[in-house]
Amino acid sequence: MLEDILLQHFDLYPQMEPQDAVKLIYQQEFGPGHLIKDEKKAMEYLRQELAGAGEPLAGEALYDPIGNGLCRLNLRVCKAKGIPAEDILRLFVDTARHVQGDKKKMTAGIRVLQKLAEEDETPFEAIRLDLFLAKYPKTCPAVHHSDAYRTAYHPAYRVVSQRNLRTYLRLLRDALQSLEK
């Protein structure tokens, strides 16, 4: 499953660097929990990010699945669809509360990435991954996107439960349909 997710993301985002792949593995395992310490500040930051979000890029989806029942909810598309910041934050916070993660699984995920790099299935050379991992702490901390990734894709998303997002979208659709009647 993780291998498939990584390969999909390599196709979607060919400018990925080793740290972007490690970030994806981290998010798949630990979700968004590392970002939420203060909900009020999280809301302020989300509002700022939404205000600065441009139009969706061509072909940009509402969300990208990242495995483990999680996805990256695209803020540009949310803004274009009029999804309120409060709803995005609630999905984000609820996900953070329910995803625990496991360092052993994170380490296993990194081994999957190493295998793909050795088989030349990554957009970067195996040696670049080896160099990144040589400096990556054994505690498996969260990392930021690489400069190359940020420049190419301008990431603006929140990691949320895919099931909760689908439920929210269904309820929103039902509410809109009942208003039309």
Image (cartoon, helix red, strand yellow):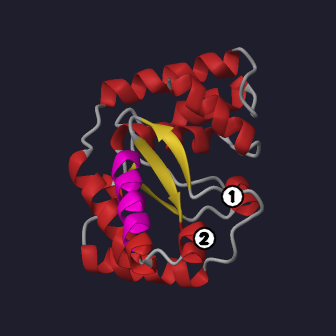
**Earlier residue among tags 2 and 1:** 1
Instruction: Give the residue displayed 25% in from the left and 66% down from the top.
Output: 37
The residue lying toward the viewer, choosing from 130 and 8, is 8
Relative vertical location of residue 92 with respect to residue 71 in this rendering, above or below: below
Instruction: Give the residue displayed 39% in from the left and 34% down from the top.
Output: 68
Relative vertical location of residue 48 with respect to residue 154 in this rendering, above or below: below
Q: Residues within 10 Å of mark 1 (few under 14, many from 20)?
A: few
Badge number at residue 60: 1
Question: Residue flagged by tag 2: what amino acid is it?
Answer: Arg
Q: Position of residue 169 (x, y in %)?
A: 42, 60
Question: Residue flagged by tag 1: what amino acid is it?
Answer: Glu
Q: Position of residue 42 (x, y in %)?
A: 34, 74
Real-space CA distance between mark 2 and mark 1, rounded to the nearest whole angstrom: 9 Å
Badge number at residue 76: 2
Q: Residue 163 lies in magenta, yes or no?
A: yes
Instruction: Give the residue displayed 61% in from the left and 77% down from the top.
Output: 53
